[in-house]
Structures are given as C-alpha cells and as structure tokens.
Image: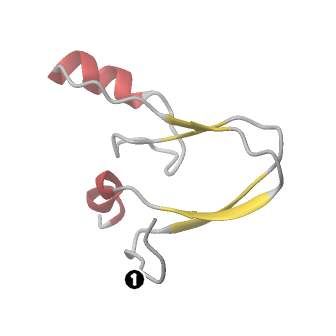
Amino acid sequence: MTQNAEKPPSTQKISLQADHKYSFCSCGKSKKLPFCDDTHKIINAEKGTSYKPIKIWPTNDITVEVYCGNWESVNEK
C-alpha cells in the first residue's frame, strides 16, 4: 500500500454503510460512477474483454476515497 501519494483528480470520496454490498465499476463506462451499472457486460460481449465489478461489503460505516484509471477518460468529458 502506498501512503501519502498524490491523488488523481478523478478520485471520489464516498461513504459506505456497514453490511451493505457495493459494486464498483472497473470498465469506466458506467453511468453511475464509481458504482457499477452492468455496462461491462455489453463491453465484454462486444470486445471480448472480461471486466467485472469490484465488490465490497464493509463491516463498519466508513468513508473511502476511490479511483480507477479507467474512469479518467469518462470524468474528463
């Protein structure tokens, strides 16, 4: 884990509730970033890729900062 690293501009701060499931986008095409909306299934079928969401089940309420390099081009529009 890298500490004190500069955060990319598309980093998003979000609050997560304990005992809820969250699915984060990894393809970068979700209309609900940073959350997954299953758009990856269309991309996978069209391009032969294998994107899958990142699933998280927090055990405590927590605020996190999240980033994915695939979100950059979407957030810069």
Is 63 situated left or right of 9 in this image?
right
Q: Residue at x 27, y 22 (%)?
A: 44
Residue 11 in the image: state x and y as whole percent: 46, 68
For numbered disc 1, what is the local secondary structure? loop
Residue drawn where x is 32% and y is 21% of the image = 42
Tell me the quadrant of the picture where the C terminus can be found: bottom left
Q: In this view, which residue lies farthest toward the left?
A: 47
Can you give x and y, in whole percent of width and height, for residue 4 in the image? 47, 83
The answer to whether 23 is drawn above or below residue 76 in the figure is above
Residue at image point 38% right, 55% down:
68
| Residue 54, horizontal then vertical, whole percent | 50, 38
Above or below, 39 against 13 in this view is above
Residue at 49% over, 50% down: 33
The reply, left or right, for residue 12 in relation to residue 8 is: right
Which residue carries the number 1 mark?
Answer: 6
Say few, some or many: other residues with alpha carbon within 10 Å of mark 1 (under 14 / 14 to 19 / 20 or more).
Answer: few
Residue 20 occupies quadrant = top right
Query: What coloring was used for the rendering?
Result: secondary structure
Depicted 48 relative to depicted 31: above or below: above
Residue 39 rendering spot, x and y as whole percentages: 39, 30
